[in-house]
Image (cartoon, rainbow, N blue to C red):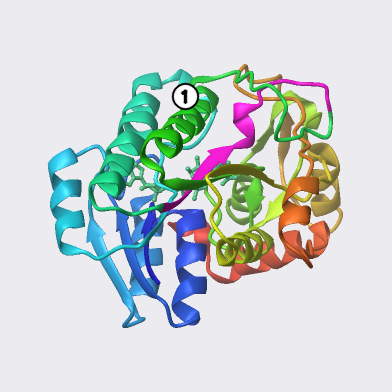
Amino acid sequence: MNILITGVAGFIGYNFASFFLKKGNKVYGIDNFDKYYSVGLKKKRIRILRQKKNFFFDKIDIVNKNRLSNYFKIKKIDTIIHLAAQAGVRYSFKNPEKYIDVNIFGFLNLIEEAKKNKITKIIYASSSSAYGESNKFPLKESEKLNPKNIYGVSKMINEEIAELYQRIYKINFIGLRFFTIYGEWGRPDMFMSKLFKSYMTKDVFYLNNYGNHLRDFTYIGDAVQIVVKLMRKKFNEHEVFNICSSKPINIYNVVKNFRKNRKVKVKLIGINKADILKTHGSNTKIKKHVSNIVFSNFYKAFYKTFNWYKKNEIHKF
Ligand SMILES: NC(=O)c1ccc[n+]([C@@H]2O[C@H](COP(=O)([O-])OP(=O)(O)OC[C@H]3O[C@@H](n4cnc5c(N)ncnc54)[C@H](O)[C@@H]3O)[C@@H](O)[C@H]2O)c1
């Protein structure tokens, strides 16, 4: 299997690549080292991946059609895991254009290349943000999408394009609606990294909406295991799956638990208009497709992530 991972310098891309490399697969990776968050952290991830001889990295922007086209002419890819994107819901209010450029045009460029090069297996990242605000918990894949921000809209459009390309060009797609993925090499713009950073630097931690958010936190190791098992099965037209533990956790309680034995200065602030109050997905569909899924205990994986963060002094990146 010759796998291409887009966004390989990112949090989820790095973790997927590490897994496949350890299994002895050849992994091709592309990323443009976008400046949305620490480029140093992204480069560090790539340096680690490069220690494996079966990893081949190229710095490519998926918005650049010609560059992407030349790349596909040379490489023999049979499966694409598409994770490159402008992530983050709050930033989508500051720079909406970027979400359209990277998440929609970039996605289209990539699947046009798949079409030209007869690649018929594409796994791509959608998001729980495609659901928007809802009260029909746990959210099933069949639920109507009603995104609340441009980021969610861009992911919903990806799903619609995938559906269309499946019907017309017979490319098989798996769409992954990730729910708040956390763990080693996590994104610095997300809740956990910010909390750990405040502890390390003694800076104030700003807790949005006074902590009254519920998040269906899903450990990266669990997400990787699920997707790998899913990939071993027959790719069937276009299927979308929630990737979630289906156990929403109150953010205030997480902060409280963390502060039991540690000092962190916390400032409670109001709600950010980009944020969704609660995420809670159903994982019934994925459990039906893939057997023996085991989800990590939240606090065990949370403290494992914290110990990794502290040991590697990630706040310095
Ligand atoms: N982390 C989560 O909880 C979560 C939740 C839902 C969906 N997702 C989706 O999963 C995917 C991976 O997310 P992540 O958390 O690893 O984010 P990330 O930002 O760490 O990784 C994305 C990578 O894409 C790269 N990239 C951005 N623009 C690019 C471009 N034009 N060309 C090439 N590379 C580009 C970035 O440099 C980055 O390394 C994204 O599609 C994201 O929207 C993540």
Image side of residue 202 versus residue 245, left or right: left
Q: Quadrant of the N terminus?
A: bottom left
Percent x, y of residue 48: 39, 73
Q: Which residue in the protein does label 1 denote?
A: 92
Specify the quadrant of the image occupied by residue 178: top right
Query: From where the camera sits, is residue 189 visible?
Result: no
Residue span colored magenta = 121-136
Write the residue at 80% across / 57% down. 298
Amino acid type at image mark 1: Ser
How many C-alpha atoms fall within 10 Å of the one at disc 1: few (<14), some, or many (≥20)? Answer: some
Q: Is residue 301 visible?
A: yes
List x then y, in percent, for residue 28: 32, 66
Residue 134 drawn in magenta = yes
- Does the magenta-highlighted stretch encompass residue 30? no
Give the side of residue 119 with respect to residue 284, left or right.
Answer: left
Provide residue 295's location: percent of width, then percent of height: 78, 61
Q: Secondary structure at mark 1?
A: helix
